[in-house]
Image (tube, grey):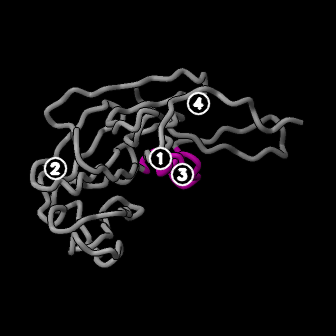
């Protein structure tokens, strides 16, 4: 039995960020085959392999500088660093269902050092940047700083559990309005509720 499928053509990128959201493989940033920086979003639907490339023209989108990205829930969080004074640094989010950018302000710490790596907490509440404060230093990993994303307006909202809570209620004999009985004497009774629509 063949487990692997044949390769599918996609886009030529390297040093990019990739992630999966709603059964689509997304590519953000990186460089193309001509070694030009890319700031568009490209995704391939993993059901039918249709490729979509989106160039978002918006005053709120990050367009230059060094980008670090991390996907959390339905957002792509992008930190633009190492602006050297002429490129605005800060933190942006891209809402993936609507593909709308939002700028969350300039964070001074992003200009305070040369940043080489970024990590994000699992719940999307904090970013850690790793780099060095001395721009002439040959050490890459001298300084670590944290950005509290909630302090700049990026708040993670946990997924709703209303559906699972309601399902538990529906199966409860204690909260049932009536019971459905089978003609088979050995079958269990099914608790049920009246529902008004």
Q: Position of residue 180 (x, y in %)?
A: 66, 38
Compared to residue 117, the image places residue 166 above or below, namely above
Q: Nearer the viewer, mark 1 or mark 2?
A: 2
| Residue 30 placement, left or right of 115 | right
Q: Callout 3 environment at 10 Å: few (<14), some (14 to 19), or many (20+)?
A: few
Q: Is residue 171 magenta?
A: yes
For disc 3, the marked residue is 168
Q: Callout 4 environment at 10 Å: few (<14), some (14 to 19), or many (20+)?
A: few
Q: Callout 2 environment at 10 Å: few (<14), some (14 to 19), or many (20+)?
A: some
Instruction: Tell which residue pokes out farthest to the right in this image.
Output: 1
The alpha-carbon separation of the residues under discs 3 and 1 comes to 5 Å
For disc 2, the marked residue is 104
Q: Nearer the viewer, mark 2 or mark 3?
A: 2
Q: Nearer the viewer, mark 4 or mark 3?
A: 4
For disc 1, the marked residue is 166
Q: Earlier in the sequence, mark 1 or mark 2?
A: 2
> At numbered mark 3, what does the secondary structure look like: helix, strand or loop?
helix
Of 95 and 142, nearer the camera is 142
């Amino acid at each position: 039995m063949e487990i692997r499928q044949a390769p599918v053509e996609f886009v030529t990128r390297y040093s990019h960020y990739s992630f999966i959201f709603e059964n689509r493989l997304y590519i953000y940033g990186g460089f193309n085959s001509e070694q030009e920086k890319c700031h568009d979003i490209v995704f391939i639907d993993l059901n039918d392999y249709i490729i979509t490339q989106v160039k978002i023209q918006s005053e709120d989108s990050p367009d230059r500088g060094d980008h670090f990205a991390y996907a959390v829930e339905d957002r792509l969080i992008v930190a633009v660093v190492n602006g050297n004074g002429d490129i605005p640094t800060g933190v942006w989010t891209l809402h993936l269902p609507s593909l709308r950018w939002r700028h969350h302000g300039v964070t001074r710490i992003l200009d305070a050092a040369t940043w080489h790596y970024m990590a994000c907490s699992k719940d999307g509440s904090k970013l850690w940047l790793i780099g060095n404060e001395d721009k002439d230093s040959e050490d890459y990993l001298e300084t670590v700083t944290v950005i509290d994303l909630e302090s700049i307006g990026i708040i993670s909202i946990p997924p709703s559990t209303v559906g699972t809570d309601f399902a538990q209620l529906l199966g409860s004999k204690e909260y049932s309005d009536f019971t459905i009985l089978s003609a088979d004497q050995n079958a269990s009774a099914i608790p049920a509720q009246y529902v008004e629509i």
